[in-house]
Image (tube, grey):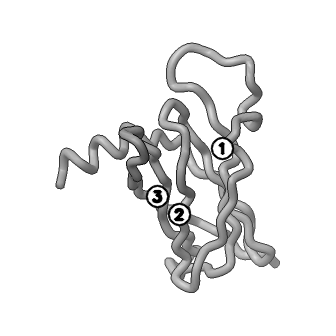
Amino acid sequence: MRRLLTAILCTISSFCFAAEVKPALSGRVLDSSGSPIAHTTVLVYHAGVKVGYSTYCPSCYRDCGKRVTTNQNGEFVVQDLAPGLWFTLLAVHQRYVPKISEKLDPVIRLRSIHETV
């Protein structure tokens, strides 16, 4: 029986390159008991424009398909994301049921983190 992967906890960080903010999503993947899950693949599953509409499908953006693997503490960082898009992440591990995050807007979360610091 496969156990439930219950959480993708995300925080936002940014990196500046030539005065352009490139947001990153980082966080931890945890099981139902709150223990970190190492060697989990976390990928950008869908993306979408924040304003207006687009002719791209939600998985056709350049950032879709970016993938990273969690470390021993279940931590991951997906870097250099487009600031004009929202994202959903998918966490997959062979011993757990896959988990999709809610829509994440790196720029809004980045702004709120800077305001609270």
Amino acid carrying label 3: it is Cys
Distance CA(mark 1)–CA(mark 2)? 13 Å
Quick check: marks 3 and 2 in contact, CB under 8 Å?
A: no
Distance CA(mark 3)–CA(mark 2)? 9 Å
Q: Position of residue 90 (x, y in %)?
A: 67, 55
Q: Secondary structure at mark 2?
A: strand
Marked residue nearer the N-terminal end (3 or 1): 3
Crowdedness of circle 3 by 10 Å Cα count: few (<14), some, many (20+)? many
The label number, if any, that marks residue 63 in the structure image: 1
Residue that sits furthest to the bottom in the current view: 72
* Residue 24 vs residue 75, the one in the foreground: 24
Corner quadrant of residue 18: top left
Amino acid carrying label 1: it is Asp
Residue that sits furthest to the front in the current view: 18
Q: Secondary structure at mark 3?
A: strand
Crowdedness of circle 2 by 10 Å Cα count: few (<14), some, many (20+)? many
Corner quadrant of residue 68: bottom right
The residue carrying mark 3 is: 10
Q: Position of residue 50 (x, y in %)?
A: 51, 25
Residue 29 versus residue 111 in the image, above or below: below
The label number, if any, that marks residue 77 in the structure image: 2
